[in-house]
Amino acid sequence: MKKIILLLTIVFATNMTHAEELLRLGIVPQQSAASLAKVWVPLAKFLSEKTGKEIRFETAPNIPEFEQRVSNGAYDITYLNPYHYTVFSKTLGLRAIARQASKSIVGIIVVARDSEISSLEMLNNAEIAFPSPKSFAATMLPQANLTLKHIPFTSRYVSSHDSVYENVAKGFFVAGGGIDRTLSNLPIDLFNKLKVIWRSSPYTPHAFAVGPSVSQEDATSIQNALISLNELDEGKKILNDLGFNGGIKISVDSDWDDVRQLNIKESNP
């Protein structure tokens, strides 16, 4: 009986250790979960091998749900947009560790390729599709520029970048907000049905950030693993599949001061 109890204690302790070593990598759902998993699961496996921790890819069904999960502390490592990072670095204590190198984030507005629309001014009183109210590049930047130009419009939120593009291509909305990376990742037949009519000024891109429960030792280990992607053949393929053609670089919190200077007045996600 004592041996059974001892064995159960060892098994329980081992399971607890594995649970403590699990780190959840939360990815903002700019695309469908299947599309994200195809390119992000290999990164999670790579980081697991390099850090000795079990790092598991996770996302959410839509951006508002992702915002809520981040707010609830659901992820240990998070890849999130610049605006969300500035909010959650303040409210949750997220710490930036890396970002794309030689890359700025730019919002775009797309219309159907056969559309006669070619400028923001031609979107007067249009219904425009956006992925989420607090999607920085794909929603906030286009909306801010339309408002600045005093162009009235109606916003419709459709949960993801892919959904924006599909709705515009099918003619359900005359235009939609997105970013170049998610547009370029579309299947070629859908990509060829769209055209870009506007691009914003550039801003610091999405952040890789760790939560307050992640130790500095683990944060450094994850950061080093991310940077090592730049040097290894396996890592370069992962970066290419992610669309991170310029590689990854170490980042610090102040890199997102350009976003903070926009002084966006929004309630916390």
Image: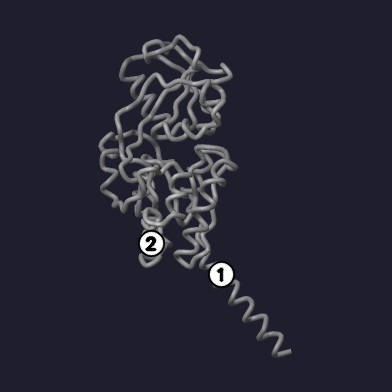
Q: Amino acid at mark 1?
A: His
Quarter of the image that includes the C terminus? top left
Secondary structure beneath label 2: helix
Could you say which quadrant of the image residue 222 lies in? bottom left
The foreground one among 33 and 225 is 225
Q: Is residue 67 above or below residue 75?
A: above
Q: Residue at x 52, y 46 (%)?
A: 39
Could you say which quadrant of the image residue 12 lies in? bottom right
Q: Residue at x 54, y 51 (%)?
A: 41
Residue 102: percent from the left, percent from the top?
A: 30, 42
Spatial CA distance of label 1 from label 2 is 18 Å
Q: Residue at x 52, y 27 (%)?
A: 157
Task: Name, please, the residue furthest toward the right.
Answer: 1
Residue 103: percent from the left, percent from the top?
A: 33, 40
**Residue 18: mark in rendering:** 1
Mark 2 lies on residue: 219
Q: Amino acid at mark 2?
A: Ala
Q: Is residue 14 above or below residue 246?
A: below
Crowding around mark 2 (Cα neighbors within 10 Å: few <14, some 14 to 19, many 20+) is many
